[in-house]
Amino acid sequence: MSSTTAALPASGAMTREHKKVIFASSLGTVFEWYDFYLYGSLAVHIGKHFFSGLNDTSQFIFALLAFAAGFAVRPFGALFFGRLGDMIGRKYTFLVTIVIMGLSTFLVGILPGYATIGILAPIILITLRLLQGLALGGEYGGAATYVAEHAPHGKRGLYTSFIQTTATLGLFMSLLVIWLCRNYLGKDVFEAWGWRVPFIVSVVLLGVSVWIRLQLNESPLFQQMKAEGKTSKAPLTESFLSKNGKIALLALLGATAGQAVVWYTGQFYALFFMTKTLSVDPNTADILIAISLALATGGFILFGWLSDKIGRKKIVMAGCLLAALTYFPVFKALMHNANPALEAAVATSPAKVLADRDRCALQFDPVGKKTFKQSCDIIASGLAKKGIPYTIESAPAGTVASVTIGSTTVQSFEGEALDKDAFKAKADEFTKQLGDTLTAAGYPAKADDAQINKPMVIALLAYLVMLVTMVYGPIAAWLVELFPTRIRYTSMSLPYHIGNGWFGGFLPFIAFTIVAATGNIYSGLWYPIGVALMTLVIGSLFLRETKDVDITQ
């Protein structure tokens, strides 16, 4: 492996060395995102195996919260690995991150479930998720900085856009492997243990990624800076306790926060909405999402290239604006085309809960110890499990809650004074009556595959991915160009990973908690819309355009 200093970036056509840098960085990052997103794609199965002590609604939400735990620590990974990258080099730092990531993912595949080792199962699982998050916190900044510092002036948007495709390609790969395992092993086997296979085979991808990255040389700009003795001795202090700290804060609020929520809404929340809310068969949903990803992924390259011509800022801001304006109609159109029977039932026979609001609790129990025995909670829990939207109308204090579906009213019961067996008997009776009423009113148990307008669903999903490509394609070049070389890895990594790790990573959890609290299946969209609008305002007013800056300084 050569240790000679590579030539500094120059203008002109993409060279063989450029292609090698882009391919090696991008392919390794694809594998990392594949590892990370397996958990998100299999959240339902993980909830059943590692959080089986919880009720159904809390089980899924807590699985999403464990998913978000990996995102929560990404900023700390950005600080730790960003500092190393600015002090000892880009190459070896983001080589270490992929090893941590890959081993953590492999161990998830062989970790015993709650039924075998009890509370240790979710504890170890969350620990592995934290390690994954720390590793990913150091990965993206390293790959983006490495590619940008090899890119010729005037082509950084295009070159770094290949890095941006990796998250979507990683998701696509994870969906493809899951689809193959589910169809080859069969539904029962897959749900029992086959869901572990995609995690286990990631060890092969780890080996390939490590081998590829070992072939790379260090960034030419970093080598020159190191040879001149200009590397930073205190990257954290220089990045955040100086004027660069203000730029980092503006980059977070005016760029990465909005980019993150658009990203996670367009890919993960759309998948959860299809399977959990619209009850589309997971196999069908995976195929539809995969096709939409294949159709729209080229947008990363298109908008990266375009950002070299007209600027990064205009494209990212336009993506945030379009997302805020169109999310509600797009997700309503998804219901219309993916589960028209559910849409018709909601329109003709809406579920209306009449209850004392003071006795209606949030349907979320993170420790699995709370039993929802009040009459309002019993109804809300029953409707939430079936993914049925509902509204709550206030009743006088002390009223036993009831739900009206169309012209039929189902009376709930107060279960607080009942023992366990008596409560179960009453709950089973209520559940059956509720189910029969919903069926009679035309509510489907699941989406009818024959009634799904698949071309239109694919078009809607592809539009959501197109918005992702608008905000994500130019973001790496924009962040790289905002900060000087000596502290670039650290400075760009923190706002990126707070934005994507916190604002974006917690989106599924926040959105579904809002839905569970309100009964409105679209209310969770207010979160990404609000964040996108915040980014639009702050980014437009306070962040500069950077496409023509000199990054060698």
Image (cartoon, rainbow, N blue to C red):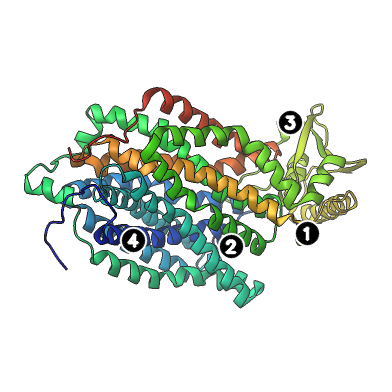
The label shown at residue 357 is: 3
Mark 1 or mark 3, which is nearer the start of the sequence?
3
Mark 1 or mark 4, which is nearer the start of the sequence?
4
On screen, residue 302 versus residue 41, left or right, reads: left
The label shown at residue 47 is: none
Q: Quadrant where the N terminus lies?
A: bottom left
Per the image, the residue denoted by label 1 is: 448
Amino acid type, callout 2: His
Mark 4 or mark 2, which is nearer the start of the sequence?
4
Residue at the location (50% across, 67% down)? 117
Mark 2 or mark 3, which is nearer the start of the sequence?
2
Q: Are marks 2 and 4 in contact (CB under 8 Å)?
A: no
Per the image, the residue denoted by label 2 is: 45
Determine the CA span between mark 4 and mark 3: 57 Å
Determine the CA span between mark 3 and mark 1: 35 Å
- Whether residue 425 is situated above or below residue 310 in the rendered picture: below
Determine the CA span between mark 4 and mark 1: 42 Å
